[in-house]
Image (cartoon, rainbow, N blue to C red):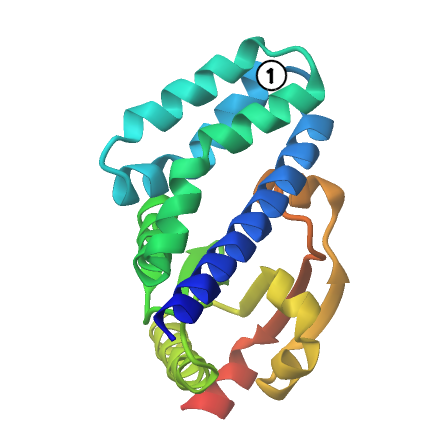
Amino acid sequence: MFEDNQHNQENERGRLAREWEEKIRSAIEILYQTHDNNQERINIAKQKITLLVTTVLEDDNQVMSNLDKCVKIENKDDFIIAIIDALKPLRDAKINDPEGFEEAQRQGWVESSNFTKINDLISYGIDEGTMHIHVAPNETTSNAKKLSMLKEGMVGLAKAVKKNEAIEKITGTSWIVAEHPRLLEKLGFTVEGDIEDEERERFFAGETRDIHRANINRDELLSRYL
């Protein structure tokens, strides 16, 4: 019995490692296509992971140092493999402690974006009369818990909007909108299609999934959730 459990755990770790590497490979492929030189590619990669690395790894300098070494690699395939290898400490951290890893991702997002956190699922930022919603990573959270946090989050958003008369539009832009349009519609949002390429490159570089936008106006939000 013990050997079977150990074997299953090893298989699960192998599956998670492969999923991680496939995701990283796809992200680097996009990064390679959208930027002209390795220095730019490495700078963007480091920018995206800096807070995460410093939060979850004891030796954060090693990952950054290994990424810097990739700048001189001319062959595309070798470049991609080297970055995957450089990021393996992050992969191991995610596999060994998925809940802690997600918490670090959430913390890093709030700190780097200057968003206001409502709960572990929902945070928001305000820009020129528009509230931008962010849905944080919660793969390790049960669906029932996520649904509860979503409902709580919508009430929190409504309360924040009520206090700020300047907010007229509430918007969310994510792969979640693309994959779950009916859920957004049930919440009162109007779902739009793909975002512009320029916006995708600026805010979602490396994301391989479709990115859509959903909007809800002030009056609709307040009438539904307050």
Residue 19 place in picture, x, y as percent:
58, 52
Residue 221 against residue 223 in the figure, above or below: above
- Image quadrant holding the C terminus, namely bottom left
On screen, residue 200 above or below 211: above
Q: Position of residue 178 (x, y in %)?
A: 69, 66
Q: Position of residue 36 (x, y in %)?
A: 69, 18
Q: Is residue 6 left or right of residue 187?
A: left
**For residue 136, above or below residue 47:** below
In terms of depth relative to the viewer, which is nearer, 189 or 15? 15
- Residue 4 appears in the picture as rendered: yes
Disc count in the image? 1
Q: Position of residue 167 (x, y in %)?
A: 47, 67
Q: Give the farthest residue toward the left.
A: 58
Residue in the foreground of this view, choosing between 104 and 118: 104
Look at 53% across and 27% down and name the residue there.
83
Residue at left offset 69%, top offset 23%: 77
* Quarter of the figure that contains the N terminus: bottom left
In percent of the image, x 72 and y 57: which residue is there? 210
On screen, residue 28 versus residue 122, left or right, reads right
Instruction: Tell which of 82 and 187 is nearer to you.
Output: 82
Residue 115 visible in this rendered orientation of the protein: no
Q: Residues within 10 Å of mark 1 (few under 14, many from 20)?
A: some
Q: Which residue is mark 1?
A: 38
Which residue is rendered at x = 47% and y = 56% of the image? 13
- Which three-letter amino acid code belongs to the residue tagged 1? Asn
| Vertical placement of residue 66 versus 2, above or below | above
Q: Quadrant of the rendered structure where residue 81 is?
A: top right
